[in-house]
Image (cartoon, helix red, strand yellow):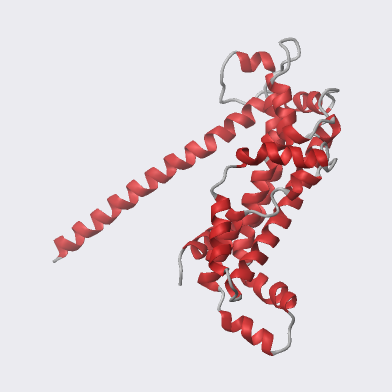
Amino acid sequence: MKREKGDERLSLFIRRAIAYLVLSILTFLCLFFFYCLLVNSTRSHPEISKGFSFIPGKSFFSNLKNVLQNENLPVLHGIWNSFFIATVSAVSSVYIATLTAYGIYAYDFKMKKAAYMFILMVMMIPTQVTTLGFIQVITKMKLLDTFVPLVTYKMVNPVVFYFMISYMESNLALEIVESSRIDGAGEFRTFNQIVMPIMKPAVAVELIFTFVESWNNYFMPSLVIKTATKKTLPILIAQLRSADFLKFDMGQVYMLVFIAIIPVAIVYLCLSKFIIRGVTEGSVKG
């Protein structure tokens, strides 16, 4: 009996040791590239050209100064432009998608299943397929070289809608909605004061994902924005990387990438506690 218990403990110890080893390796691989970025942002272009080093350099502030004072790169404008577009896109997209999911989940009407299937079909269409028509439309509306197209084209996001309605099916009891209606609350008051607090974990998850997606988006802003002071950070990074040989500086490139990661890391740290709970509860029906 004692021998069997000892074998079980040994087997459990081995499994835990293997699990911790695998998790440690995965953690190292995830953090190693961030460490490489941080190290290279502190090194000058000649130092980076010599090869990778685990030891940080002494050119962090000089790289930062060169990036911020680069006449061809309005970095401060780029940071504000990216932050404004990503924030407005994330908030509007999540709110509208949640409102749409609530309308389909909480109401019974004709063509309900057809509307649901139509949204899912739209989700399967790549953005690149509709880009040409989208550019033609905003050109005719004289919205080219403005932030309006970059904010509005992501407002109706089928992926966010699907996640939200899946979460509602698992966590939002229709009895709560009916009770609110019986008490005399209007539909928008019910949605904003009762449904949205219940949806908080899912909202936080999608805010992170949508913010990061919009922040890193290069394809659409590069087609819409032409004015230098309106360009976003991904465009500026690509512009810096494509500079001619005399102006090319890897130290500035790594510094600009490092600056671009900071807001994403802040948003993630502020909302990360909701990620696991939101993803788990949104993907498993009760």
Q: Quadrant of residue 134?
A: top right
Q: Is residue 176 visible?
A: yes
From the top left corner, tell me how far across and down residue 151 is, in percent: 75, 48
Residue lying at 53% horizontally and 34% vertically, measured from the top left = 32
Q: Is residue 51 above or below residue 141?
A: above
Residue lying at 58% horizontally and 29% vertically, measured from the top left = 36
Quadrant of the rendering where the C terminus is positioned: bottom left
Residue lying at 62% horizontally and 42% vertically, measured from the top left = 127
From the top left corner, tell me how far across and down residue 17 is, in percent: 33, 48
Q: Nearer the viewer, residue 215 or 17?
A: 215
Q: Is residue 252 visible?
A: no
Q: Nearer the viewer, residue 66 or 140?
A: 140
Residue 244 relative to residue 27: left or right: right
From the top left corner, tell me how far across and down residue 176 is, in percent: 61, 82
Q: Is residue 54 above or below residue 99?
A: above
Q: Nearer the viewer, residue 66 or 209?
A: 209
Residue lying at 75% horizontally and 10% vertically, measured from the top left = 246
Q: Is residue 241 above or below residue 209?
A: above
Q: Nearer the viewer, residue 53 or 91?
A: 91
Across the whole image, how many numbered discs are drawn on residues?
A: 0
From the top left corner, tell me how far across and down residue 280 is, in percent: 49, 62
Quadrant of the rendering where the N terminus is positioned: bottom left
Q: Quadrant of residue 229?
A: top right
Q: Quadrant of residue 183?
A: bottom right
Q: Residue furthest top?
A: 246
